[in-house]
Amino acid sequence: MSTCCLCNKIFCKRKDGKGYQKRPLSTPVHFKHSQLTILEALKLFYNYNGPVDSFICFKCFSSVGKKCRQNHGSPKRKTRVATVSSAARTCRYRRAFRNLLACGPAARKAFNALVRQQVWKEMATFMQQDGFPTFDGCKSIEEFTWLSLVDRFARSLPTLFSALVGSMPPKLCSEDNKPMCV
């Protein structure tokens, strides 16, 4: 009569009478995005050095699977970071940023700091190159147009411009006011 290689208990007979309640050590344990055999899991978590052709009982099999999931995460539960990185890898940046901002207050704070730093750099470059825009070389105030200034801001300060347009109510960015939202 054979015993479980982990708990050394004798295997119980199956209810249908066709053998015993046991699994070979070559049976895969599914976790993360790969398969690990029971033998590999036993070597990894229990320092198993027994024979390769042994068997394991159902109770020990479930405890080995549970240990794998606890130490390496469940394949069904993707973390937010994995979701963000997979979305970024497939060029779905809007989804990646949306998931990143949903990670929590620390992620939102880091994102805001990054945007703030980018706007500051754009503004410093804009002020060095062009200086503060006044009337853009217009001789009179009647010649001045806001559209040219808005267009210049959109080209020179894209992050700041996007943040400002994003904060505007949708009715201001309708088809009638399209030049305002470029």
Image (cartoon, rainbow, N blue to C red):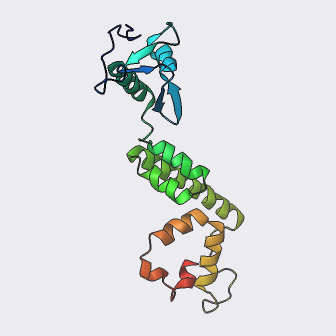
Residue drawn where x is 52% and y is 31% of the image: 35
Seen in the picture, residue 117 relative to 135 is either above or below; the reply is above
Seen in the picture, residue 10 relative to 181 is either above or below; the reply is above
Quarter of the image holding residue 58?
top left
Seen in the picture, residue 77 relative to 53 is either above or below; the reply is below
Quarter of the image holding residue 22?
top left
Residue drawn where x is 48% and y is 69% of the image: 166
Instruction: Tell whether 14 sits left or right of 83.
Output: left
State the residue in front, 85 or 55.
55
Residue 61 drawn at (x, y percent): 38, 22
Which quadrant: the C terminus?
A: bottom right
Residue 124 drawn at (x, y percent): 63, 58
Which quadrant: the N terminus?
A: top left
Residue 142 drawn at (x, y percent): 61, 92
State the residue in front, 57 or 121.
57
Residue 173 drawn at (x, y percent): 49, 80
State the residue in front, 95 or 145.
95
State the residue in front, 22 or 86.
22
